[in-house]
Image (cartoon, helix red, strand yellow):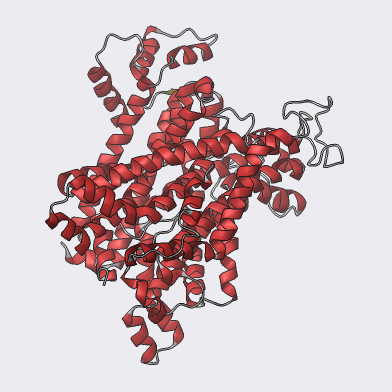
Amino acid sequence: MLVISRRLFFYLVTAAVAISLDFLIPRMIPGNPVDAILSKMQGVTPTRATMHALDLQFGVGTSTSLWGQYTHFWNNVLHGNLGVSTANGFEPVSTVIRQALPYTLGLVGLATLISFVLGTTIGAIVAWKRGSWLDNLIPVVTFFQAAPYFFLAFVAIDVFAIRLGWFPTSRAASPADFPAWNWTYISDVLNHAILPALTIVIASAAGWVVGMRNVMVTTMDEDYVLIAAAKGLPKRRVIWYAARNAILPSVSGFALAIGFIVSGSLLTEIVFSYPGLGYLLLQAVSNDDYELMQGLFLIITFAVLAANLLADFVYVFLDPRTRQEA
Amino acid sequence: MAVGIGTERVTGSGPVPGGTLPGTTARRQRALRLPRSPKIIVGLAMLAFFVLWSIIGPLVAPYSPNQIFANSPVPLPPSGAHWLGTTALQQDVFSQLLVGGGDMLLVAFIAGVIATALSVIIGVTAGYLGGLADDLLSMLANIFLVMPALPLLVILFGFLGKSGSSDLFLVGFIISVTGWAWGARVLRAQTLSLRNRDYVDSARIIGESRRRIIFAEILPNLTPIVASSFLFTVLYAIGTYSAMAFLGLVNPNWSWGGMLFYAEGSTAELSGYWWWYIPPGLAIALLGTALVLLNFGIDEFINPRLRVAGLTRRTGGRRRARPLRSQQFALTPVRVGATARSAAAGSAREGGPA
């Protein structure tokens, strides 16, 4: 399909730009990250090969040309070699990220899905009941739209985990539990995920509510909605006609929103000590683990691009006009 | 600080009696209508409060935010001596709160100005020139929109180091680099729609220069969108700066995000030290709310159908001739897409401006 292939091309370009930025930023900003890494290696004498790899990675004191470094970097990335993580005992970055990725994908993916469904539904209802008491919801929504995710996470932990004791305060599973495919473990993981997921849903649903309401208000003025109502269709059906059309911009705007949601979710993970990518991000920051930072940037970008592609498929499925083009 | 554009729009042509030219009268009426919206009034009042706070706060703070009062690891709850209690280092939370707004607002303002300038230059150029330039610039904007900002900023600030990140101008600049794309996309879409209006066509036929058409015919009609994209970027910068301070990537002494950084480090949320983390978090949220409300106001100004008072098509009809592009000025998407598919969807639905 033309639309999808065009988008796919765009995502490939974006991925290439992300990889290039990953390569360029350490070289553009003054400072010597190699020294910082070597200072972490106390007790470990770096081999000549390690030194050479680090020099190539950051472009310090190497005789290889910039273009040579660049192709070397690409070669590494394409082979899944993202360097080593100094904060994790020099394990490969790709291994470290692979261990954390499922937690983030599960938590953020599920929370995003719930918040999208919940937010657009509330938005459609608020728009339909325009002028009623439901409009008072808007200032409340505004507040949650503006509040930082990590602040909401603080409040959620204090109120629901500490004061009420309904949920565990941190981590993805009880330390005593042994990972296995049985109900005890799965329910434990779910129990640990509820509060962080709830935080992400509450923080991100606000955006979908406002977005849906604003488009829905415009859609409700369309002739086909008027006709549907004039024909005497049940109200539920009329709302459905309007909502079906109003949801399209929300789906196409997914690209913009998902970046914000992922960013906020990573910070939420930090507050909950959830062992996902956000936690790695904090680890990388507090240990000056540059290669982990770079690897995380690439992986998170790729994940966001994949989510976007998924949204594109949904859009093409929902809107026949995009299919006609092809 | 951030009030700049807002007040200008509201009071700029305030008490002036109606002009003689019909065009200017209409414009004045529109400018006068803006502050009547309760959202604008509340938003402006809240914003003014926070700006005053950040200016006066450091002067009236009862203590220095760094002063250590005792040698105990347990934060004290609010009392007469410490209105909002103390931190785990026995520093005064209230003083930190009063001091913590200034740097953040300054950074947000710098980022807002730079990003708005970038988005106007890139968005209007792309929308007006069209063709290959448009394709390339739009692609650039879309790439920056899709790329998740947080991990990118982590690399930038990570390599910059603590010393570089205490330069507020540099911090504002870096934040603006990741925050201009949204405004550029909206401005491009609007420019694209304005470019084919009759009045721009006639200006072109008269033989006006391209520069004059852009600056005299198109830019003035983009003002509400420029203003809202400025507010949006300021909001984005506040959130980003807080997040960076919360991660400890920019110097956390003293900003509201930095207070949360220290509170998290001492697990204030697990110990119930609410007086330590609620005030800075609430301050960020309320400042953001002010900006979102202002954006709502501008939004309703651009698209009258969004107003709450049950406007029907008939009453909104007169101004329906205005560009009906609904934007959402917060964390959510734009209806008018730069991408082919949403542009197609948009124009198909709206049927163009009547």
Q: Is residue A39 above or below residue A112?
A: above
| Vertical side of A33 occupied by B54: above or below | below
Residue B30 occupies which quadrant of the picture?
Answer: bottom left
* Extreme residue in the right direction: B80
Q: Is residue B80 left or right of residue A242?
A: right
On the image, the x and y values in percent for residue A206 come to 52, 59
Q: Is residue A216 visible?
A: yes
Which of the two residues, B212 or A64, is positioned nearer the viewer here? B212
Measured from the top left, where is residue A193 in percent x and y? 58, 50
| Quadrant into which the C terminus of chain A falls | bottom left
Give the tally of numbered discs.
0
Q: Residue at x 71, y 43 (%)?
A: B269
Quadrant of residue A316 within the rendered picture = bottom left
Q: Position of residue A2 (x, y in %)?
A: 18, 56
Q: Is residue B269 left or right of residue A212?
A: right
Quadrant of the frame with the N terminus of chain A: bottom left
Q: Position of residue A128 (x, y in %)?
A: 48, 77
Q: Is residue A180 above or below residue B66?
A: below
Visible residue check, residue A185? no
Q: Residue at x 49, y 64 (%)?
A: A209
Q: Is residue A198 left or right of residue B205?
A: right
Residue located 47% across and 65% down the image: B33
> Looking at this view, is B107 or B143 the one in front?
B107
At 54% from the left and 60% from the top, the residue drawn is B40
The quarter of the picture where residue A11 lies is top left
